[in-house]
Each structure stands twice: as C-alpha cells, then as structure tokens.
Image (spheres, rainbow, N blue to C red):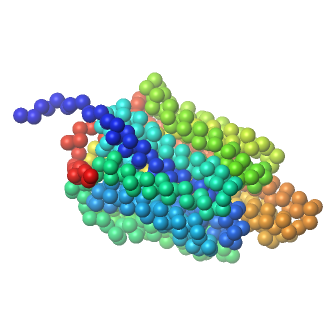
Amino acid sequence: MSDTTQAPAPSAGPREWLGLAALVLPTLLVAFDIGVLFLALPHLSADLGATGTQQLWITDIYGFMLAGFLITMGTLGDRIGRRKLLMIGAGSFVAASLLAAFSTSPLMLIIARALLGIAGATLSPSTLALISNMFRDPKQMGTAISLWAFSNFGGAALGPVIGGVLLQHFWWGSVFLLGAPVMLLLLILGPILLPEYRDADAKRLDLISVVLSLAAILPVVYGTKQLATGDDSSPVGALLAIAAGIVFGVVFIRRQLRVPNALLDLGLLRNVRFSSSLLAMLLASGALAGMGLLTSQFIQSVRGLDPAEAGLWQAPTGVGIAIGVLVTPVIVRRIQSRTAILGGLVLCFIGLALLSTVTRSSSAGLVSLSVALVALGIGPMFVLGTSLVVGAAPPEKAGSAASMSETSNLLGSTLGLALLGSVGAAVYQSGMADSSVAGARQTLAEAIAAAAGLSGTQAQSLLATARNAFTDGLNVVAIVGIVVIVIVFALVWTTMRQKAATPPPAAADPDSVTETPAVTES
C-alpha cells in the first residue's frame, strides 16, 4: 500500500550542482552572442563593407532565429531527449561559430549568424528543462533558477565587455571563437554529469507549424526595420512584408487551436497572470536590449574610446544584472513579489531618464551608470517573471510554459535590437539629411570612415554633426524606453497581485507529471 503523504523533495547532490555549472555554460554563451557584436560592428563593417541594413541583419538575425526555433526545439527535445538535443546543439554551435569567425562577406556572416541562432535554440529549452528535473527541493530550485537567469540575461550584458577586450588584441572574428572551447567542454562533461529525460508521450513535431511561425515573425520584423531605416525608395514592399507576416500569424494561431500536436498551447494564455507576465518580460527585455545597442556604440564611437575601454565601461551593466538577479530570491522572502518588480521598474525609469539627458560631451561614466540602473531594476522582472509564468501553468504543461517564457524574453530582446535600433538610425539619418557627404548619412560608422578621407576642419565638422545626430537618436530611444517601462509598471500593478511568486512546478512530486525520465547514459 502506497503512502499518500507527499514525501519531502530529495536534495540535489554534488553531481547535480556540477551539472548546473555545465548547463550555465551554454546558457551564458547563447545570451553572450546577442550582444557580442555591438562593439565589433564598426570593425566588421569596414572589413566586409557591410551596409547599414546588412549591419542590422548581422546583429538581428541571430536573435530572431533563436526566438523563432525555441518552441520547436523544445518539442523536439521532449521527443528525442533533452540531453541528446543539448549535445547536438553544442556541436552545431561550434561549427557555426567557426563559419562566422572566418566569414569573408556580409552575406556569409548573416548566414553564419542565422545558423548560430538555430543551434542556440536547441540549447536554450534543454537547460531550463533539465534544471527542473535535477533540482526537486524548492529552495535549491530557487537558487538554481536565479543562477540560470543570471547566465541567461547577464550573458548579453557581458558580451560587449569581453568582446571589447578581444577586439583590442585580435580581429573581429575572434569574438565568435570564445564559444568553441566552452562547447567542446560541454560535449565532454554533459554525458557524465547530466541525466537524460524525454517525454514518453511526446507528440509528433508539426513541421507546418514550424514554417508558419517563422513566416509570421521574420516578414514583420523585416518590414518594420525597412520602414524605420528608410532604405527602400518606396514603403510598399515593407508594408506588404508586414501584412504577409500578420496573415501568416493568424494562420499559425488558427492551426495551433486545431491540431492535436500544436507547437504552442494557447490555452495557457487564458491565465491572466501567465499572459501578462509574458508580455511584461517581452517589453522589458526589448527596452534593455535596444538601449544596450546604442549605448555601447555611443561609448565607443561618440566618446572615441578604444574597444577595450569601451568594453570595460559596459561592465556595470553585468554587475547590475548580477545584483538584481541574485538578490531577488532573498528580497522576496520579506516583501511581495509584485513590490520587488515594481521597485525595480522605478530604478529602470530613473536610469532611462538620466539617459535621455545625455549630450555628445557627456562622460562614459554617466551613460554606464544609466544602463547599470536599468539592468539592476530589470533583474527582479526577469527572475520572478520566469517563476510566475512557470508557476501559473499546471505541472503537466510546465515545459511548454518554460519554452514560452524563454521565447518571450528572446523575442523581446531581438525586437528591441531591431525596432529601437531602427528608431535610433532613423533619427540619425534625419539629422544627417543635409550633410554634403553622402556616405555618412546612413550610420555613424560610415561617417567616421568618411571623415578619415577629409581635411582636418571638414572632418571635425562632419564628426561633430554625426555624433550630435547619433546622440539625439539615443535620447529618443531612452524616451521610448521610458514609455515602455511605464506600460510594464501598469501591467504589473494591475495583474500581478499575488503575495509571493508561485514555486516552480519542478518542486512538485515527479510522479504527478507525465514526463518520464529515460535511462541515463554512461
């Protein structure tokens, strides 16, 4: 006769904690690759001759492919095994990194970045899912999730820092080689430290839904970016792309409601806390990523610092993320989760307000402080938002909820890079419309390159105009960020009224969920 009393969750041992360290590595690198090119853009632009639009695609395509394939790969991991998918992804990530590092044209680099995004999508859902299997004790789970969140969101902040140091001593392709030895280490340690889990009742992957999801996301992003940058002589093509993406999005949603093996369980969105948490994280991550793109270029190209110095001035962003993420589990033992999130959003507001006052002559320290405040304030939203999303879902749907949480954050980050980056570019191009140097009207990097061929007085005049125009774009983006944070504040205030974050479903009795662990390979 079985005992109906729920036994205490087993505590994780040394193997699980070492396994967590192995899982943090790919999570860190996947996020790292989102921001690692911020400081490398001027260098690769000069080397490869990338246009302004190509630069945006080089920056954006990685995140869009990552976000577009996350849920697909989550379903695939349930079917073939999460550890196996993690190993496949690690090997693919190494190959795509080598291709990116030694690219000889903008198109080749864009393709390599797209392949990196697909490889990264095989890694991301597997890490959080395996953590939920390895840590059953609620307190240990909270610690593991906070460390996972730090690596996930801190990696993007550390990208410009480490990238700047590499650029000081090596060529721009070196920023891609950092991940190769780390992924090779994962390939060695993964089978030893990580258990294998697969869903015995996993459904067949719906390839039509995969295609529809990409067909919905990419055209909308492309069209929005083209309208903002003004690269098209006519907006008709961009508008048609947006319309096509919306149509494919409607078809995708209708299919998810109809097929039994849907990629997205849209029924979860009926839970107000679930859907509002996803939206809040999407908006907040977008504001942080878009601001990070412009501030890193301001420090390097407006203030004229070399890559190593510019990278070091990005370090406070990583510190802010680290403090915000790691202290949140301690804070919510004393105050409500909603209060912690709202307090953090107030810090975001202050940081963005400071950023909106920046001028061309402002110090790198002021810009760095502004970004650090935003990063610090957004930390509770990232950690508790993930717990709120996973906790709002029933245990049997926790895996789907976790994939949607990661998709929301990554899609928000990549949309922030594209849309806010395009807003900044549009303001810059407006400020440079009357410039007599046609080659300097698209990007600040082009203006700096054009100034090198002019006389001293002409070069100084061009650089002053270009740097003022870029700073104006940064100010406008900061104001847009303030509006976004106010919207997130109102959303959290009205929808997240629970006193504490719901414990992650991974702390529940493992026998209560349908997932079946496979035999651990040795």
Q: Position of residue 367 (x, y in %)?
A: 71, 43
Q: Is residue 211 above or below residue 133?
A: below
Left or right of residue 340: residue 51: right
Going 53% across and 66% down the picture, which residue do you hit? 98
User: Which residue occupies the foreground of this view, 32 or 16?
Assistant: 16
Going 32% across and 36% down the picture, which residue do you hit? 13
Going 39% across and 56% down the picture, which residue do you hit? 187
Residue 336 in sight here:
no
Q: Residue most toward the left?
A: 1
Residue 178 in sight here:
yes
How many marks do you count on the picture? Answer: 0
Q: Residue most toward the top?
A: 334
**Quadrant of the rendering where the N terminus is positioned:** top left
Q: Position of residue 238 (x, y in %)?
A: 59, 71
Task: Specify the quadrant of the image occupied by residue 40.
Answer: bottom right
Left or right of residue 90: residue 511: left
Q: Is residue 121 above or below residue 223?
A: above
Going 20% across and 31% down the picture, which residue do you hit? 6
Q: Position of residue 170 (x, y in %)?
A: 66, 59
User: Which residue occupies the foreground of this view, 134 or 344?
Assistant: 134
User: Which residue occupies the foreground of this view, 215 or 319?
Assistant: 319
Task: Specify the quadrant of the image occupied by residue 173.
Answer: bottom right
